[in-house]
Image (cartoon, rainbow, N blue to C red):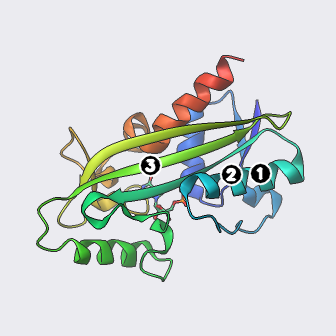
Amino acid sequence: MELIFATYNPHKLSEIRNALGPSYTIQGLVDFNEKEIPETGSTLEANSLIKAEYVFNKYQKACFSDDTGLEVSVLNNEPGVFSARYAGTGNSIDNIDLLLANLIDQKDRKAQFKTIITYFDENGIKFVFEGIVHGEIVLEKEGIEGFGYDPIFQPNGFKETFAQMSLSQKNEISHRGIALKKLLAHLTSR
Ligand code: IMP
């Protein structure tokens, strides 16, 4: 089955290809020479919808998008929808450094990653899938795999951060992995 994934992020593309397996051909926005679609919504749900709707309206093909946020309890669930732009530079290391600075001396480091996937089937019918992984923000960066906040997020029940795990280990338990399993279950049940 062919699907368009409304992302420019090569890490996300390879995570999703790895999770969905060889029965699916996934194209990214880079395959269509598309520019990044502006995320102007104020929630993860709204941003996910904006991206999927844009691609479906333009290409009339089955497509999906994801929007993810890191929600830190003691920071009133920030950075949340602003996760990519938290430090204002668009740079992941700056985002991590700001988050660690905002949590300095803080004992409560509970956090969760939340992903919302919006899928449009080939007839334009919309389905929404959510994935959440609970964990905590560690004291300093650990690991070099993955992207974004992976070096400082340790999922509950593990001693490693996401950045110390292989791609398939992360996919097994991650927010996006969980939301994707729901998408996959939907696709295979049709
Ligand atoms: P997006 O809007 O879904 O691209 O995600 C917003 C931001 O959240 C990204 O720029 C990353 O900084 C962060 N993010 C999303 N997914 C992950 C992940 O799996 N690991 C670490 N950070 C992530």
- Residue at the (36%, 43%) spot, across then down: 133
Residue at disc 3, secondary structure: strand
Regarding residue 144, the answer to whether it shows in the image is no
Q: Which residue does the image show at 65% across and 61% down from the upper left? A: 8
Nearer-N-terminus badge (1/3): 1
Q: Which residue is mark 3?
A: 114
Q: CA distance from mark 1 to mark 2?
A: 6 Å
Q: Can you say which quadrant of the picture contains the N terminus?
A: top right
User: Where is residue 173, by image quadrant?
Assistant: top left
Give the residue pinned by disc 1: 53
Work out whether residue 102 can be spotted: yes
Residue 149 shown left or right of residue 20 in the figure: left
Coordinates of residue 183 in the picture (x, y in percent)? 60, 31
In the image, 135 versus 34, the foreground residue is 135
- Say which mark, if any, is on residue 49: 2
Q: Amino acid at mark 2?
A: Leu
Residue closest to the far top: 189
**At which x and y percent is residue 111?**
29, 54
